[in-house]
Image (cartoon, helix red, strand yellow):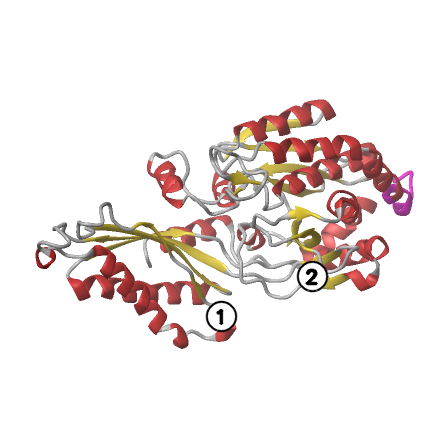
Amino acid sequence: MSRMTKEEVKQRVCEAIVAAQPRLREIAESIMAEPELGYKEVKTSKKVRDMFDELGISYTTEHALTGVKGRMKGRDSKYTVAMIGELDAILCPRHPRADDLTGAAHCCGHNIQITNMFAVAMGLQSVMDELAGDVVLFAVPAEEMIEVDYRNKLREQGKIKYMGGKQQLIYEGAFDDIDMAMQMHVETAKTPAGEMGLGSTSNGFVAKLIEYHGKVAHAAAAPHEGINALNAALMGVMGVNSIRETFKESDYFRFHPIINQGGTLVNCVPDYVQVESYVRASNIEAIVNGNHRVNRALKAGGDAVGATCVINDLPGYLPMRNDARMNEMLRQNSNPLFGEENVFQGEHMTASTDMGDVSHLMPVIHPWVGCINGVLHSAEYEISVPDVAYIKTAQALAMTIVDLLYDDAVGAKDVLDNFTPALNKQSYIELLDRIAKGE
């Protein structure tokens, strides 16, 4: 039997988050100052472990290489809710806080996610005996799907099976003891006060490494003796551009390649070119179908000049699904903090996140919180509404966990009773493996 009312529990949680702000801002700044890229987050992982030690929270390590998983036990352990924060940074060498050596920068807001994870932990610590479930605090690696060639080498070495952190965690079984999950992400503030954008849907994608193999020759003296791999790549990309009108607008199709290697010497016919891209769409069928069509166009570029096209398809992320019941709880908790006019249902997002993979297995919410100036992932990124970034968002998420686990966890039971997973762990792994085989 609970000794405090739910409102009293929530008030204590919110007060504790405010009281912890000086320490929380230190954590955010410490992570911001030492950004690390996916599957390389050694220093950041150590900061998380040190903070768990400071708070007396038990944890396990080396999940998907660098992940750290803490757990706070409730009065009962009927259900487990995970609060997730991401360890990795993005590549943005022009950002003023970028690492001089690697170009990594936390203009993705993941340091804010980790800070929110700890804010929720510090808010809930003193009321866990009022809750009928556990709270997992999960610092996870490699959400940003970058350095695909590097991650593919990790995969070939057997260190990981999948490119994304949460994909690898699902495969390893790190989500097997979790019933539902939540995390936040930052976006550009629309008003000076900041906003709570309830999560909606998003695109998923297949990651691609495309190689064109030609024949080297002197570019001026004997170009007729060569096979130009760069021309093959350019024609392949133009081939995809030529079929763009055939993709349905409702599928939000995207193809956005870059050339990682386009030749070695200007006076040599390029004999090797590597292109990297995603094929994105709003649903699994459109991703798989669109990827087959893109591959045909890319290979045609090689055929046109006599080059060989080798395509390595790598499982990207699945489309995002937010749980309606959990979203409504978050809305009710956000309204008094943000003002109803600043709480809204987000629209479909054409970008992607590996939280989409988790959402196919369990109920998930992934709000987008307006608290920055500039564009996400850009050199202009900066926090503009710190109280939204570090206080209000954490309070809203922590109170939503209270709604789920208070009163014999009836909220969590209602969510799970009305949730139908799109995939189970086995069918999820089978799907990713089919994508990797180009099926």
Query: Which residue sits at x=66%, y=46%?
Result: 382
Q: Is 330 rendered above or below residue 246?
A: above
Q: Nearer the viewer, residue 269 or 364?
A: 269
Residue type of the residue flagged with mark 1:
Asp
Disc 2/disc 1 C-alpha distance (Å): 22 Å
Instruction: Give the residue number, with chain letter if any, for mark 1.
Output: 251
Specify whether residue 160 is in view.
yes
Q: Is 209 rendered above or below residue 103?
A: below
Mark 2 or mark 1, whichever is nearer to me:
1
Residue 268 image position (x, y, % from top left) = 17, 49
Q: Nearer the viewer, residue 1 or 178?
A: 178
Q: Is 52 rendered above or below residue 208?
A: above
Q: Which residues are magenta?
A: 1-10
Specify whether residue 73 is in view.
no
Dot label at residue 324? 2
Tell whether 379 sits left or right of 134: left
Q: Identify the secondary structure beneath mark 2.
A: helix
Q: Residue furthest front?
A: 220
Label 2: how many Cα within 10 Å (few below 14, some 14–19, many 20+): some
Residue 1 image position (x, y, % from top left) = 88, 40
Tell whether 251 sits left or right of 323: left
Q: Residue 291's quadrant in the figure? A: bottom left
Tell whether 433 sits left or right of 420: left
Q: Nearer the viewer, residue 270 or 153?
A: 270
Residue type of the residue flagged with mark 2:
Ala
Q: Residue 408's quadrant in the figure? A: top right
Tell whether 218 sits left or right of 146: left
